Image (tube, rainbow, N blue to C red):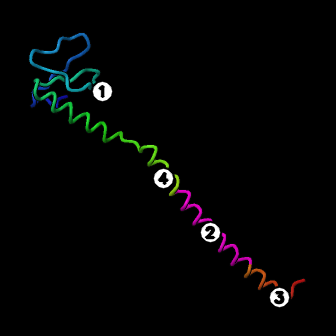
Amino acid sequence: MNGWRFLGAREVHRGERIPARYGVAFFDVARHAGVAFPVPLNLIIRSAYLTWLWVSTARPTTQEELWFAREDARLYRAKVAVLEARVKELENELEKAHNERGGP
């Protein structure tokens, strides 16, 4: 709250009256109080605060989650194919070494 003091911010606790010509811009959870600014400024600060809150808590949509799942599955299948090819190579090398040694 102290950082907002230069803009005329005031704390408004529950049960207190909002000062004349002031409006609550947002609720400060840490101080458990509303932060009020002069009327035209409170709308600007509130919209900036809500925008910041929306951007910082943005979550992927269902469509994006499906895309991520498909991409993960595609990458997983590619990794499995590479590992299966490597296993096949190792089996061939092992069979070749076994045949050269004259195994049963």
Question: Which residue is painted at 10% across and 24% down in the image?
Answer: 38
- In the image, is residue 12 above or below residue 70? above
Q: Quadrant of residue 33?
A: top left
Mark 3 and mark 4: Cα distance apart in space: 49 Å
Number of dots carrying numbers:
4
Label 3 residue SS: loop
Which residue is under mark 1? 30
The residue most toward the right is 104
Which x, y percent locates residue 53? Answer: 30, 36
Badge 2 crowding class, 10 Å Cα cut-off, few under 14, some 14 to 19, many 20 or more, is: few
Badge 4 crowding class, 10 Å Cα cut-off, few under 14, some 14 to 19, many 20 or more, is: few
**Residue 101 badge:** 3
Which x, y percent locates residue 93? Answer: 73, 82
Badge 1 crowding class, 10 Å Cα cut-off, few under 14, some 14 to 19, many 20 or more, is: few
Which residue is under mark 2? 81
**Residue 68 badge:** 4
Please report whichever mark, 1 or 2, sits nearer to the chain's N-terminal start: 1
Q: Quadrant of residue 41?
A: top left
Question: Which residue is painted at 53% across and 56% down in the image?
Answer: 72
Task: Give the magenta part as a residue range.
Answer: 72-91
**Residue 82 badge:** none
